[in-house]
Image (tube, rainbow, N blue to C red):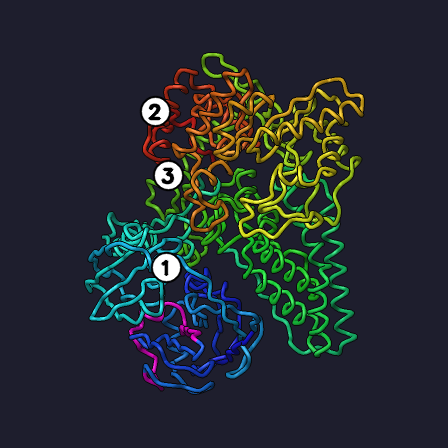
Amino acid sequence: MSTLTLVAPLAGWSAPLDEAPDAVFAGRMLGDGVAIDPTAGTLHAPCDGEVLLIAPSRHAVTLRTEDGAEVLMHVGIDTVSLGGEGFALAVAQGARVRTGDLLMTFDLDLLARRAPSLLTPVVVTAESGFRILRRTEGRGVAVGDPLMVLAPERPATAAAAASSAAGEPLTQRATVGFGHGIHARPAALLAASLRNLAADVRLRARGREANARSTVALMALGAQQGDEIELRASGPDAALALRALAAVLAAESAPAGRRGVRPADPATAAVPPAELAVTGNTAMPVAGDVLRGVIASAGLGVGRAVQLRRPEIAVAESGAGVAYETAALERARATVRARLERRAAAVAEGPGGRAAAEIAVAHLELLEDPELLAAARAGLAEGRSAGFAWREAVRAAAATLRTLADARLRERVDDLLDLETQVLLALAGAAATPQLDLPERSIVIARELLPSQLVALDAGRIAGLATAAGGATSHVSIIAAAMGIPALVALGPAVLRLREGTELVLDAERGVLEVEPPPARLGAALAMLAARRGRLAAERAAAQRACHLADGTRIEVFANVGSAAEAEAAVRDGAEGCGLLRTEFLFLERESPPDVTEQTAAYQAIADALAGRPLTIRTLDAGGDKPIAYLPQPAEENPALGLRGVRTSLANPQLLRTQLRAILGVRPGEQCRILLPMITEVAEVVAVRAVLEELRAELGVTRAIELGVMIETPASALIAERLVEVADFLSIGTNDLTQYTLAMDRLHPQLAPRLDALHPAVLRLIAAAATAGVQRGRMVAVCGGLASEPLAAPLLVGLGVHELSAVGAVIPRLKACLSRVTLEQCRALARAALLAADASAVRTLARGACGEAGEGAA
């Protein structure tokens, strides 16, 4: 395979592209690469090639090599707004250049004063068909130093498939509303809006035509604000493509509306709210502004901004000798190892405690990773210091992980960077985690927040969390919900420009962050908080009683747990049992599966914590986003549709037998019931029941044990009337059911916010399953994320659900909400919701029916 080497086009510090304070670059919407913080004002050619494009404002240059690789160099962030001031070109568009030739000079001091950042992305454009094999990051580079090694990779695209589609093209006219015309960011937004659409799309402006999927071609149009452009599309999704492009253009052109609400970014109407993390306004927020984000943990917070940034620890490149630096690294690793082992072995007290222990276990594994150690030791052998060698090894591994398709593996990047910091702090003799002295009523601001960062903070001083990026299904979002901390994610880069101490109202019910609101609004929010705290105290006291509707109808409210500590906390919150025990915590992050003794002991501890209350144990839900190292899993292009859930257990019968044997060993036996994940066929339930009955006979267990199935796919919902013939109860997992029904990956950063389980299509499947259960006299539960939404509780009961299993912290609110409605009111709400147009309409109906009871708490 032929490769292409790019050299550094300017001198400075080479950093991961993720650090660019503009997530169009950080999110790799334009392509992959690195970002260089320049120390001199000259830009040179990183390779031989043609000057394909020079931005009208002279701040960006794109080269194309003979092999077709396109390399964009964008000097600084938001420098298009300078209108060319401070830039002087040394070449013309269309010129042929050699590696190292001068392309431009720029006024470093002027840019430092006028631009948000000098960080200069060097990007291999996504559409040019090259991938990065190696890159230089986390170190200084001089002009001409090796920067990236590329290899060709030209996958088929939807556009290629669509180009041959028959049919007359559709056309539409639109007006460019982008303030500086179609430059790098708008081009990326326009191209991104067409992702996964099967259509050949062209834009025509100023006598030129461009492929709408090519960011370079779009920039080359030279279209300016106010220009009229023609959109033309052909192929199966031609109409959708035109609507997507028009929405991007219309969103930018729309008037701001009422004062204080920022106009939507160009992508807002074309992509879901999570993309605000990469398309949000980057201007400094001012008093009265409202930033819109995605609700990660519902509630209301009033406080002052506290910016939380990951510390950049200075390390010397040269070491004091191989032996000395090797010993220093080993001492630091031993220090970190001891800290992590203490944390992993500690009892996970309270919400978030289990997460801290799991993180510690994961970090211990990474600390001993042989590839990481080999890379660090190679750096030591070359004369690097212990800190520099460790940082270089970690960031190289992180860069590799970022290129992988598996979302769970990409998440390990944050673990690597977290571990990097821990070891560097140990080398410096500093504390394990720099303590942030949070003031009272802190609203913590960050680009993204690591779980380890969150659990290290004083939760009692946190009024809310607000992040520029992130998703509503991230680990931090889950922990925040468990801790009862209101949180908004995907607010965009503007949130990072908030001044320390800025007064904020974080409304994680409407999805907005209000900047320095008027005194009247601030007072009203504080009064609302006080009222809610009083109500919450009353609800917590009332939650210790069994849950009944206003007419006396009994509804059981259970908790989803993953440890004995979580079970104890859930009981304190009023849980009447456990509706879902996630057993994956026993199987992940280890080299061999747990045996019967270890599993039984873990299940028994949780049963004891529940003090006789029901315990529903879900069998191993592996595969998909939860791969297990010691299981022989085939390579899968789409793990969500592959060997996961009960399929994994049936493919590994000994693993299944061991787990069932362990569950049968819990005492008292009548406390437990078994739940099977990802059921799509009656035969799967029959097969597991056969194994269970065989083990009961072998162990002499005479008591019956209930065997239930999870309804997580449209298939299982639609054959629920058959499943209830072989299963003792149904439990609906709304997270997976929603993603499979709506064909949206719940880990996808753009689509995750649109996965609303209150979509009428999802509700109809829930209704089908519930009806089948009621007709057969089977108990029907909901254990997915929808069960943790008080707003949804009456609706689910109206659909025929008998049991809700939720996050422990929301149980008092759930019970309070249900206590205010009758069964007939719930059924009336359900009938109306099934006829609603979309999830938004359902939420409006639910708010009207539930009133304040369905709102989030502080």
Residue at 67% across, 78% down: 318
Name the mark nearer the viewer: 2 or 3: 2
Residue 159: which numbered mark, if any?
Answer: 1
Q: Quadrant of the N terminus?
A: bottom right
Position of 517 with respect to 547 (left or right) is left
Write down the residue under mark 2.
Answer: 832
Asked whether the residues under the numbered discs 3 and 1 touch, taking CB atoms below 8 Å apart as contact, a structural biologist would say no
Q: Which residues are magenta?
A: 68-92
Q: CA distance from mark 2 to mark 3?
A: 36 Å
Nearest the eye: 141 or 764: 764
Above or below residue 822? Residue 592 is below
As helix, strand or loop, the secondary structure at mark 2 comes to helix
Name the mark nearer the viewer: 3 or 1: 1
Q: CA distance from mark 1 to mark 2?
A: 41 Å
Write down the residue under mark 3.
Answer: 523
Residue at 71% across, 59% down: 367
Residue at 67% across, 47% down: 628
Q: Sequence order check: which comes first, mark 3 or mark 1?
A: 1
Q: Spot the residue most to the top.
A: 552
